[in-house]
């Protein structure tokens, strides 16, 4: 059987890097996308050692024109895209009254608009077929409000809504393409460190205390590892998950149970 090709945005570090590694271990070719080429290349070397054919593309996913070029380049190289993982994202919030509109726009562009640009380009040029999968890395913050995280929470709710609508559309038209969101809770990555720094400032505590308070909120009492999110993504790309579509699935240690 021909190898599948996965395109992962936000692949340069954190959850996206863990997903790329896992899908390579599942035997897929990988297109790694982010802005920082050096970090993509480091990951690509690691994946190549596992026998994965890798293409790295430096692309700002908020730039629709660049995204179209990136997807066309990936399809020219591998022939088609079987699995799309929209993982690129950023945090962003604060006291809403004091937010700048620039911050609002950048969070919405990076998390929500980018997902539409990449998905739209893949649906038009990616030659997806029955058995293909679109997976959007949203957040538990896409299902409930995050205090002092209005732009982030709004962007992630948007991702969940888009996933549910497109999942139904692609089920009803008989495409055989599944569309799901994965909603992590607190995952130990660079973004999590940034979130801790912000909460420490807002709560007027040090970062160790902010970490303790966050872990206390999680019923299993700890941060989720990026590998644990990657395992859900791998499941969603497996033949046994053909019946799972238009869903938003939490990997959050019980932080949310909805
Ligand atoms: P991270 O370590 O900060 O990584 C973010 C990734 O997105 C990087 O690869 C970054 O690469 C890429 N990226 C950001 N802006 C981009 C842009 N404009 N164009 C292209 N790539 C861009 O974050 P993470 O924790 O792994 O988060 C990954 C995803 O999971 C995000 O969507 C996040 O919202 C979601 N999530 C995270 C958590 C958590 O607790 N960590 C919880 C729930 C959901 P470059 O900087 O090289 O471009």
Image (cartoon, helix red, strand yellow):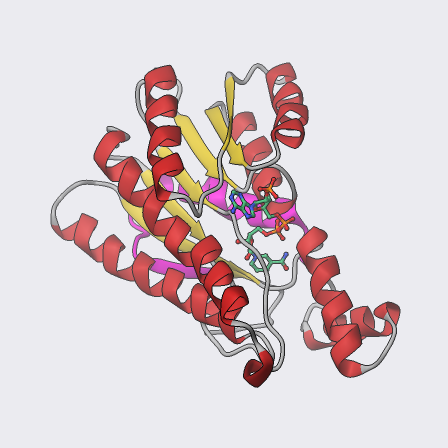
Q: Is residue 79 above or below residue 115?
A: above
- Residue at image x 32%, y 49%? 179
Q: Is residue 47 above or below residue 160?
A: above
| 255 left or right of 155 in image | right
Q: How many marks?
A: 0
Report the quarter where the C terminus lies.
bottom left
Residue 240 in the magenta stretch? The answer is yes
- Residue at image x 86%, y 74%? 209
Where residue 114 appears, as percent x and y from the top left, is 40, 49
| 171 left or right of 140 in image | left
Q: Is residue 92 above or below residue 21?
A: below
**Range shown magenta:** 223-249
Nearer-the-camera pick, 248 or 108: 108
Tell which residue pokes out farthest to the left in this image: 173
| 223 left or right of 144 in image | right
- Residue at image x 59%, y 81%? 98
Where residue 241 appears, as percent x and y from the top left, is 36, 45
Q: Is residue 81 visible?
A: no
- Residue at image x 57%, y 56%? 90
Where residue 233 appears, as percent x and y from the top left, is 48, 44
Report the quarter where the N terminus lies.
top left
Nearer-the-camera pick, 211 or 70: 70
Q: Quadrant of residue 91?
A: bottom right
Where residue 182 appears, as percent x and y from the top left, is 47, 55
């Amino acid at each position: 059987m021909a190898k599948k090709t996965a395109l992962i945005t936000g692949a340069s570090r954190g959850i996206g890097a863990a997903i790329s590694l896992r899908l390579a271990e599942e035997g897929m070719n990988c297109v790694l996308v982010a802005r920082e080429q050096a970090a993509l290349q480091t990951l690509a070397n690691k994946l190549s050692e596992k026998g994965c054919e890798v293409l790295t593309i430096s692309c700002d996913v908020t730039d629709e024109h660049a995204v179209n070029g990136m997807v066309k380049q990936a399809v020219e190289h591998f022939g088609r895209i079987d699995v799309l993982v929209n993982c690129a994202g950023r945090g962003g919030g604060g006291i809403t009254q004091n937010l700048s509109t620039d911050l609002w726009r950048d969070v919405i562009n990076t998390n929500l608009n980018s997902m539409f640009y990449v998905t739209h380009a893949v649906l038009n040029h990616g030659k997806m077929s029955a058995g293909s999968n679109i997976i959007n890395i949203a957040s538990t913050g896409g299902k409930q409000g995050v205090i002092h995280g209005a732009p982030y929470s709004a962007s992630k709710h948007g991702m969940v809504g888009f996933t549910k609508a497109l999942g139904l559309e692609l089920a009803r038209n008989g495409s055989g393409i599944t569309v799901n969101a994965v909603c992590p809770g607190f995952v130990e990555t660079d973004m999590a460190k940034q979130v801790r720094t912000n909460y420490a400032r807002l709560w007027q505590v040090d970062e160790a205390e902010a970490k303790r308070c966050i872990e206390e909120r999680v019923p299993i009492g700890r941060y989720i590892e990026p590998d644990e999110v990657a395992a859900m993504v791998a499941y969603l790309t497996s033949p046994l998950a053909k019946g799972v579509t238009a869903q938003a699935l939490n990997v959050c240690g019980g932080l949310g149970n909805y």
